[in-house]
Structure formats: C-alpha cells, structure tokens
Image (cartoon, rainbow, N blue to C red):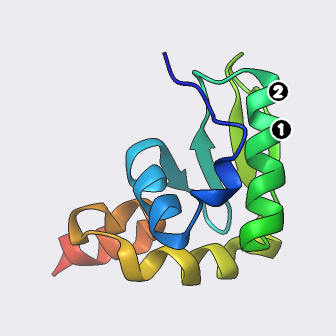
Amino acid sequence: MKIIPINIIEFLSPLALAIWFMSDGHAGNVSVYISAARYTKAECELLIDALIKKLGLVVTCGEPDGYPVLYIPAESYDLFYSLVNPHLLPEFRYKLDPHYYRDKLSR
C-alpha cells in the first residue's frame, strides 16, 4: 500500500518527479499524465498542493477510468519538461517526447 506523507513537499524535487514520471507517467502531445491509482483523494490533493508550491506546476486530478490521474496541462508542459528532462534515463525518453521514439525508429 502506498501512502503519501504529510510532508511530501520536503521530498519533492525535479529528480523525484522524473523518477515518478518514469514509473507511472506518460505525455500526450503537450500534456502530462501521472497515475495516482493507489492514492486517496486527500493524498492526491496533498500531491497537487506540493507540486504547485514547490515546483510551480499547474496540476489537476481526474478519474478518467475510475482511478486518480494527475494531469499537467499544456500551460505547464515546458516547465515540466525542463524539470524532468535532465534526469530521464535514455530508455524512458519516449515517455516524455513521443516523437523522439518515433524518429528513432525511423532511422
């Protein structure tokens, strides 16, 4: 069982966000989705608050398939990209930039 600590803001960093994204996230054309399926609504709100305050991201939570998903819209995509890109392992680059993977295959 995953539990978000009340002091999560102390642990959030661009590196932590990149690791979380590599594990549970994916990007659309200009937006980002990170699964929060194991978290309660209150924990999602805690995460959203921490991501806004600590990293300056615009974040909302939805439940498109009945499970919580954190959504980072186009207005924060460039900021998100700049935060996590330096920390992504090459094997996970396709998650941040779908075109990267497609272009790599076409070479």
Give the amino acid type for the residue marked by disc 1 in the picture.
Answer: Glu
Which residue of the protein is positioned furthest toward the left in this rendering?
A: 107
Q: Quadrant of the C terminus?
A: bottom left
Image height of 15 relative to 41, above or below? below
Image quarter of residue 13: bottom right
* Relative image position of residue 97 (x, y in whole percent): 45, 71
Q: Secondary structure at mark 1?
A: helix
The disc at residue 56 is none
Image quarter of residue 51: bottom right
Q: CA distance from mark 2 to mark 1?
A: 5 Å
* Relative image position of residue 101 (x, y in whole percent): 30, 68
Residue sitting nearer the eye, 60 or 45: 45
Please give the name of the residue rendered at 35% of the width and 70% of the height, measured from the top-left corner.
Answer: 88
Please give the name of the residue rendered at 26% of the width and 69% of the height, measured from the top-left corner.
Answer: 89
Marks 2 and 1 close (CB-CB < 8 Å): yes
User: In the rendered view, does 71 fall on the left or right side of 3?
Assistant: right
Number of residues whose C-alpha sits closer than 10 Å to that of mark 1, classed few (under 14), some (14–19) or many (20 or more): some
**Mark 1, residue position:** 45
Please give the name of the residue rendered at 40% of the width and 83% of the height, measured from the top-left corner.
Answer: 86
Please give the name of the residue rendered at 82% of the width and 74% of the height, measured from the top-left corner.
Answer: 75
Image height of 22 relative to 98, above or below? above
Image height of 67 relative to 73, above or below? above
Q: Secondary structure at mark 2?
A: helix
Residue sitting nearer the eye, 77 or 101: 77
* Relative image position of residue 37 (x, y in whole percent): 59, 24
**Mark 2, residue position:** 42
Give the amino acid type for the residue marked by disc 2 in the picture.
Answer: Ala
